[in-house]
Amino acid sequence: MSADQLFQIVSTLVLPGWLLLILAPRWRFTMPVAAVGLPLLLAVLYAVLIGQHWGEGEGGFGTLDEVTKLFANRYVLLGGWIHYLAFDLFIGAWEVRDAQKHQLPHLAVVPCLLLTFMFGPAGLLLYFVLRFGLRRQTGV
């Protein structure tokens, strides 16, 4: 299978998890799917992909130039994309669980989830700003 085909598959694969987190955060299957099932499936795909294609090109992690060379291999680049997809979804699920634990309104968390989906760390930052901001206001 080509890297482009795999890219399309994995990019679509995470969408149900994000939709569950946004639309059905308390449904009994949301966390098993979004926090465990999909991230684990992506982790397996990542491990297989990196295992098959590591060492095919040049590069490394010592400098930005080495990382650029490393990601010149489309399959290694795809591995990096899968890495983002898996960890961003995992963090989104954590945000939902943590918000429920601290009794934050889910509608306030949705923008954080959308930002986490698109820009991972920025969404996590927004979630912490929300969490600690509401905690100060409400004492939650």
Image: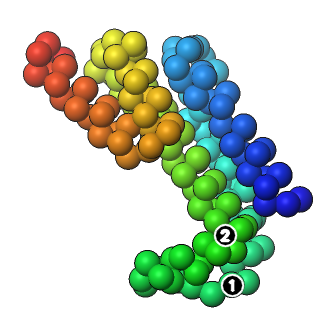
Give coordinates of residue 96: x percent, y percent.
Answer: 43, 26
- What's the residue at 57%, 85% (across, down)? 59
Name the one closer to the observer, 27 or 70. Answer: 70
Q: Position of residue 72 (x, y in %)?
A: 64, 75
Amino acid type at circle 2 is: Val
- How far apart are the alpha carbons under marks 2 and 1? 9 Å
Mark sitting on residue 57: 1
Q: Residue at coordinates 43% horizontally, 78% vertically from top-left?
A: 64
Mark 2 surroundings: few (<14), some (14-19) or many (≥20) residues within 10 A: many
Per the image, label 1 sits on a secondary structure element best described as loop
- Quadrant for residue 32, please give it: top right
On screen, residue 105 versus residue 140, left or right, reads right
Residue beneath label 2, please? Answer: 76
Is disc 2 placed on a helix, strand or loop? helix
Q: Is residue 123 above or below residue 8?
A: above
Using the image, tell me which numbered label, if any, was put on residue 8: none
Q: Are marks 2 and 1 in contact (CB under 8 Å)?
A: yes
Whether residue 105 sits left or right of residue 66 in the image: it is: left
Which colour style is shown? rainbow
Image x and y of residue 127, in percent: 31, 32
